[in-house]
Image: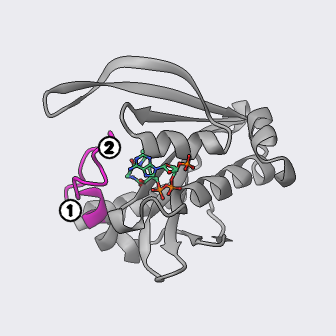
Amino acid sequence: MFAPEIVGKLVKLEPMDESMAETFYSYINDPKPNRFRPAPPVESVEAEREWIRNIGKSEQDIVWAIYCLEDGELIGSTGLHRYERAHQRAASGTLIAKPEHWGRGIGSEVVRLRTDYAFKELGLHKLNSEVIHGNTASLRMLMRVGYRIVGLFRDHFLRDGEWLDFYLLECMRKDWELARPDCR
Ligand SMILES: CC(C)(COP(=O)(O)OP(=O)(O)OC[C@H]1O[C@@H](n2cnc3c(N)ncnc32)[C@H](O)[C@@H]1OP(=O)(O)O)[C@@H](O)C(=O)NCCC(=O)NCCS
């Protein structure tokens, strides 16, 4: 689905395009930012290009590239996935690839912009997300905008021989309205 440009104070969100394939291939195959992401590595730059091409045509996904306004760098991606028009819901996810961009409020702004878009422009009823146990930054980032923990899958993810639990989060429209009263 079409991903419109959205500009905040720290970031600009833009539609992904094939020219970004090489950058995202390196980001997705870098173990550090992907430590808490269940997505498998990508085989080649061409496979990444193909993924970007397909996602642009998908009726169930909206994916944005994230640019840091301070240094102009392409730093990651965020998206709404498994969009179900009939049930007015979607799942969400974010990757900020370089640790030097972490902990500066960027993720929180990205999630605010994406969540405002989901409820205001798409008219969704709820969003959901999944966070691997131990990913405190992701949990805090999501809960600030109205996501709540609604469940836990135990031993859901095997990383380096260790079983990890998986939090399930939801953000209902009413949770977002409470968290972002000025944005309705
Ligand atoms: C998760 C991620 C998107 C957060 O982005 P970010 O720009 O670092 O987030 P923010 O700076 O807005 O911080 C969000 C919250 O996490 C806290 N936080 C940031 N880094 C933290 C850390 N290493 N440990 C604990 N808390 C941390 C912040 O203090 C803030 O909480 P607060 O609002 O209560 O103060 C980013 O770290 C990332 O992309 N990590 C790798 C991929 C990933 O894990 N994606 C999520 C998959 S579910």
Locate the N terminus by quadrant. bottom right
Residue that sits furthest to the bottom in the current view: 71
- Residue 37, relative to residue 96: is it above or below? above
Residue that sits furthest to the front in the current view: 103
The residue at 84%/47% (across/down) is: 181
Tag of residue 39 = 2
- Residue 11, relative to residue 56: is it above or below? below
Q: Position of residue 135 (x, y in %)?
A: 39, 40
Q: Is residue 30 left or right of residue 161?
A: right
- Mark 2: secondary structure: loop
- Mark 1: secondary structure: loop
The magenta-colored residue range is: 25-43
> Dot 2: few (<14), some (14–19), or many (≥20) neighbours within 10 Å?
few
Q: Is residue 1 visible?
A: no
Tag of residue 92 = none
Residue to which mark 1 is pinned? 44
Query: Mark 2 or 1, which is nearer the eye?
Result: 2
Residue type marked 2: Ala
Q: Position of residue 71 (x, y in %)?
A: 46, 83
**Residue 125 counted in the magenta span:** no
Residue type marked 1: Ser
Pointer 2 with pointer 1, Cβ within 8 A:
no
Q: Position of residue 96 (x, y in %)?
A: 41, 60
The residue at 43%/40% (across/down) is: 136
